[in-house]
Image: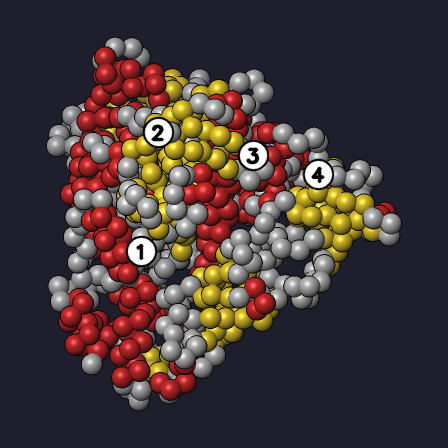
């Protein structure tokens, strides 16, 4: 039975997503409840060409979920009779709460998100790691669940408005995903006044949804305004605004001078032409490139990365805080750094005309711009020039200015690297980025789309090369011996159902996709990206296309990176702002020589989960800050008319994305001169009297009627 199902769907021996592997493997075990299987036997039955690592990873997930039992020597057997699979089982996952109070929980080893009704959430809140009981109701295909235990709170600190009562105070959180108020004793209010914005720390959690947790006020925030709202976004995502005194003291005690003994242990690049290319307003320079022509005529390019692991030692307060944060957070008007400023903007930052300690990946390119040698190790550099992207781009275009000839050669090599990547099946995810010009008070005076040119992509291509080669090095080192646990950046194959649904959506707008294999999907997405440059309606599909993809994350289980078409990939190039890179530096350094050092894999995987979770929170915070600033910008344009495109349709109205600044607002059907019927798939709406059809991608003219900063909403009407 399994073979027939598989042949129908997977007739062209192809790689499967981790979720599909688990689903099809499980079906084999169910069809053969008394048999034992190893990865090779399963691969033969499936006809898949996934790597052994991917097969072992999928089997491990099924074992973790309690479906199969490991028997040793890579053999597995069904753990329980097939009939029992419809009964309740216990899983763990992270709560993703909706505005209605219900939640969806993404569980490892489970193909579909688990729906949890508000009454079954218990005391769980958005972002919490929970244990839940899961079942599939009779006659339905989607699982449901009930939270049985909160394993780890996403945050204990919240922002809210305080209301003083006779015997106690109540803090009402500003975040809709915190559905309960917090009780505070009057002695613990820090003299906050009625209606003040405060930060409250929960000291005693509630047991049931109808109970209130208890807490204490830790800070009374200033008056409402843009600066406060940015802080609120960060706090609500669980980020601490300031560093503890112990962390500041540790960073302050690090010596600034580089000793001669330290220099002697490193490869010296101080006499080699070296420069950085970064945004105009950047302060933390993670990476630099060096360039020189070798005696054999080949070109040597050094990718030099700030040696954060030299300064941030394991088990120190500095290291614990960096891991806790895991990432710097980039909002529209500020950066919340992972490391204290003395490290991020001073000691570690590769500033021009200063000697800096680096960890480098050095590549030798032959006359055909192919890598023929690579070297990894600790170095010391002296950056000769700090370029902004604009300055480097000018040098590329005109051939004039500092090091323009070298920049042009590096750009030529970058083009070759990029071409090879796309030839191998990489996907072009180059979506539009919104940028703001702010006045001295942080209020946006201009909104524009960032233009990506060769200077941006040049740096990106060399960083991708270094990240890939580091991961390959670790894997080659482990050949013919036990695995060396490492922090990989992985990206799974897309989910078949989501991609097919998107393909139907794209077809409605006149774009045909081929989605039979991962390779065809990648090619279709790249055709879509090219078409988007010429067609504004198709351009609206790009963010939706990206959402159909699996999320990239960190893991010790290497399944490759589908989007980049790399079998091995890591993050090595940004340790000032990513803790994953700090871990990669430590593991790589300890395995450079003859010795082999293995970190505890289970502990490393737990760190990967935390880092991935913090990365998602940082991205959510960035999106919220962009939305806030867009609404703040549009406050000055109430009553004005704009051209835009229909970017979404729901039961109560139409979303419009403005053509010039990408701000999005809504035209409610209640503002129009007739009721509308929204079609299936929400691709079009039809006037119930006139028969007028409005569809996704239509060009329209709208007037901005009202803005609401609190709700991050822009109300519009059709002109």
Question: In this image, 613 relative to 687: left or right?
Answer: right
Residue pictured at 22% horizontal, 34% vertical: 535
Give percent across and percent down for residue 606: 49, 58
Give percent across and percent down for residue 285: 44, 28
The tag earlier along the polypeptide, 1 or 2, is 1
Residue pictured at 48% horizontal, 44% vertical: 620
Give percent across and percent down for residue 642: 38, 26
User: Mark 4 or 2, which is nearer the eye?
Assistant: 2
Circle 2 SS class:
strand
What is the distance, in whole Å, between disc 1 and disc 4 at their CAs?
43 Å
Q: Which picture quadrant has residue 24? A: bottom left
The tag earlier along the polypeptide, 4 or 2, is 4
Q: From the viewer's side, name the closer residue of 717 and 16.
A: 717
The residue to which callout 2 is attached is 701
What is the distance, in whole Å, between disc 1 and disc 2 at their CAs?
25 Å
Circle 3 SS class:
loop
- Quadrant occupied by the N terminus: bottom left
The residue to which callout 3 is attached is 709
Residue 654 in view in this figure: yes
* Residue 197: image tag: 4
Q: Is residue 643 above or below residue 20?
A: above
As drawn, the residue found furthest toward the top would be 400
Circle 4 SS class:
strand
The residue to which callout 1 is attached is 680
Q: Is residue 2 above or below residue 640?
A: below
Question: In this image, 40 relative to 603: left or right?
Answer: left
What is the distance, in whole Å, between disc 4 and disc 3 at their CAs?
16 Å
């Amino acid at each position: 039975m399994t073979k027939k199902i598989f042949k129908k769907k997977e007739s062209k021996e192809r790689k499967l997503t981790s979720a599909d592997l688990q689903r099809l493997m499980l079906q084999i075990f169910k069809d053969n409840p008394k048999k034992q299987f190893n990865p090779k036997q399963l691969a033969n039955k499936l006809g898949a060409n996934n790597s052994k690592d991917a097969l072992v990873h999928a089997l491990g997930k099924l074992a973790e979920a309690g479906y199969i039992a490991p028997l040793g020597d890579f053999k597995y057997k069904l753990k329980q009779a097939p009939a029992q699979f419809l009964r309740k089982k216990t899983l763990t996952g992270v709560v993703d709460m909706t505005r209605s109070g219900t939640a969806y929980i993404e569980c490892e080893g489970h193909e579909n998100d688990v729906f949890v009704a508000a009454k079954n959430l218990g005391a769980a809140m958005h972002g919490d790691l929970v244990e839940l009981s899961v079942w599939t109701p009779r006659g339905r295909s989607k699982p449901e669940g009930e939270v049985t235990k909160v394993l780890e709170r996403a945050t204990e600190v919240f922002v809210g408005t305080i209301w003083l009562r006779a015997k106690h105070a109540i803090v009402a959180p500003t975040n809709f995903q915190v559905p309960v108020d917090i009780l505070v004793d009057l002695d613990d209010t820090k003299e906050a006044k009625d209606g003040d914005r405060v930060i409250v720390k929960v000291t005693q959690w509630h047991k049931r949804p109808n109970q209130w947790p208890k807490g204490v006020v830790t800070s009374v925030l200033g008056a409402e305004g843009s600066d406060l709202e940015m802080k609120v976004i960060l706090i609500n995502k669980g980020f601490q605004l300031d560093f503890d005194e112990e962390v500041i003291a540790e960073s302050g005690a690090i010596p600034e001078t580089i000793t001669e003994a330290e220099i002697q242990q490193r490869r010296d690049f101080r006499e080699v032409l070296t420069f950085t290319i970064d945004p105009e307003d950047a302060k933390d320079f993670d990476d630099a490139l060096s360039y020189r022509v070798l005696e054999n005529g080949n070109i040597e390019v050094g990718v030099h990365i700030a040696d954060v692991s030299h300064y941030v030692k394991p088990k120190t307060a500095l290291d614990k805080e960096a891991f806790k944060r895991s990432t710097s957070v980039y909002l529209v008007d500020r950066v919340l750094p992972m490391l204290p400023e003395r490290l991020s903007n001073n000691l570690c930052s590769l500033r021009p005309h200063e000697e800096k300690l680096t960890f480098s990946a050095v590549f030798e390119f032959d006359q055909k711009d192919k890598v023929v040698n690579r070297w990894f190790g600790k170095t010391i550099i002296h950056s000769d020039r700090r370029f902004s992207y604009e300055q480097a781009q000018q040098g590329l275009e005109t051939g004039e200015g500092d090091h323009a000839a070298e920049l042009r050669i590096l750009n030529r090599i970058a083009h070759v690297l990029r071409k090879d990547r796309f030839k191998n099946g990489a996907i072009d995810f180059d979506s539009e980025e919104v940028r703001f010009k702010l006045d001295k008070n942080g209020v946006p005076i201009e909104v524009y789309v960032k233009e990506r040119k060769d200077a941006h992509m040049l740096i990106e291509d060399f960083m991708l090369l270094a990240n890939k080669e580091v991961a390959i090095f670790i894997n080659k080192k482990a050949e013919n011996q036990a695995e060396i646990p490492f922090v990989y950046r992985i990206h799974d194959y897309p989910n078949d159902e989501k991609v097919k649904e998107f393909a139907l959506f794209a077809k409605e707008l006149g774009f045909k996709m081929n989605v039979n294999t991962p390779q065809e999907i990648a090619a279709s997405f790249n055709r879509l990206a090219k078409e988007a440059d010429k067609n504004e309606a198709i351009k609206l599909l790009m963010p939706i296309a990206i959402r159909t993809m699996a999320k990239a994350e960190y893991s010790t289980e290497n399944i490759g990176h589908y989007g980049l078409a790399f079998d091995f990939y890591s993050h090595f190039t940004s340790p000032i702002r990513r803790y994953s890179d700090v871990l990669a530096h430590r593991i790589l350094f300890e395995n450079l020589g003859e010795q082999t050092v293995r970190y505890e894999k289970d502990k490393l995987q737990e760190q990967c989960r935390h880092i991935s979770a913090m990365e998602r929170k940082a991205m959510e915070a960035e999106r919220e800050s962009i939305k806030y600033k867009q609404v703040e910008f549009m406050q000055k344009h109430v009553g004005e008319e704009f051209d835009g495109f229909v970017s979404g349709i729901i039961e109560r109205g139409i979303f419009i994305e403005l053509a010039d600044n990408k701000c999005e607002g809504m035209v409610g059907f209640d503002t129009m001169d007739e009721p509308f019927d929204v079609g299936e798939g929400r691709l079009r709406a039809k006037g119930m009297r006139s028969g007028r059809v409005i569809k996704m991608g239509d060009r329209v003219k709208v007037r901005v009627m009202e803005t609401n900063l609190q709700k991050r909403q822009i109300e519009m009407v059709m002109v």
